[in-house]
Image (spheres, rainbow, N blue to C red):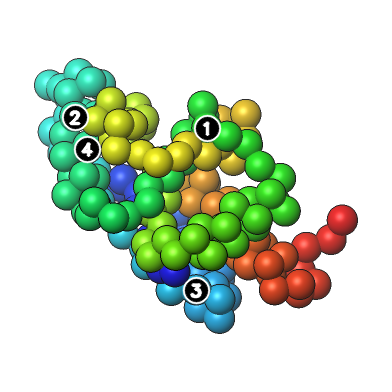
Amino acid sequence: MKIVFLTVGKTEDAYLKEGIDKYVKRLKHYTKLELIEINELKNTKALTSEQQKVKEAELILKKLSPLDHVVLLDEKGMEFSSKQFAAYLNKKAISSTSTLFFIVGGPYGFDESVYARANDKLSLSRMTFSHQMIRLLFVEQLYRAFTIIKGEPYHHE
């Protein structure tokens, strides 16, 4: 199973980039992981938040194929423990999901067209985190999930 982590905007802070790179490197032992960064929109002062979401949606939807399983990282999504997330990933792998997309939207979230395309929504917390920080939190949880699946000692109860 290939996992694609698609984000709107680039990770700017060096300490976050370093952390993300650390877990992406570790994940190479477990899965095929592709990171896709869609450039943030330029000249958005004249656009409403809804117009920005529509433009971002067009860019996001272009990256998806009809067979991709799409999971939006969204505050209204389902919440898992780390073990439950590992079980979710394992179930997707067993069910022959070929490409699993996890998507972080722009500053205003997702347009309805992206919600309509999504298969699932996942919340990493009921708290709100910056879009920059959620990237590091997600790749760490992805790494943790694979170590749980493999029975390795990274995760402690």
The reply to whether callout 3 and callout 4 are in contact (CB within 8 Å) is: no
| Residue at which label 3 appears | 31
Measured as percent of width and height from the top left, residue 30 is found at 56, 76
Q: Which badge, 4 or 1, is on the more N-terminal residue?
A: 4
Q: Residues within 10 Å of mark 3 (few under 14, many from 20)?
A: some
Disc 2 residue type (three-letter): Val
Nearer to us of marks 2 and 1 is 1
Position of residue 88 in the picture relative to residue 120 (left or right): right
21 vs 89: above or below: below
Q: Which badge, 2 or 3, is on the more N-terminal residue?
A: 3
Residue at figure coordinates x 50%, y 73% from the top left:
31
Q: Give the Cα separation between the discs numbered 2 and 3.
A: 32 Å
Q: Which mark is residue 77?
A: 1
Q: Quadrant of the N terminus?
A: bottom left
| Residue at which label 4 appears | 56
The reply to whether callout 4 and callout 2 are in contact (CB within 8 Å) is: yes
Q: Is residue 129 visible?
A: no
Measured as percent of width and height from the top left, residue 47 is found at 15, 22
128 vs 23: above or below: above
Q: Residues within 10 Å of mark 2 (few under 14, many from 20)?
A: some
Disc 4 residue type (three-letter): Glu
Position of residue 40 in the picture relative to residue 91 (left or right): left
Measured as percent of width and height from the top left, residue 57 is found at 22, 37
Nearer to us of marks 3 and 4 is 3
Position of residue 35 in the picture relative to residue 27 (left or right): left
Residue at figure coordinates x 54%, y 52% from the top left:
138
Q: Give the Cα separation between the discs numbered 4 and 2.
A: 5 Å
Disc 3 residue type (three-letter): Thr
| Residue at which label 2 appears | 54
Label 3: which secondary element = loop
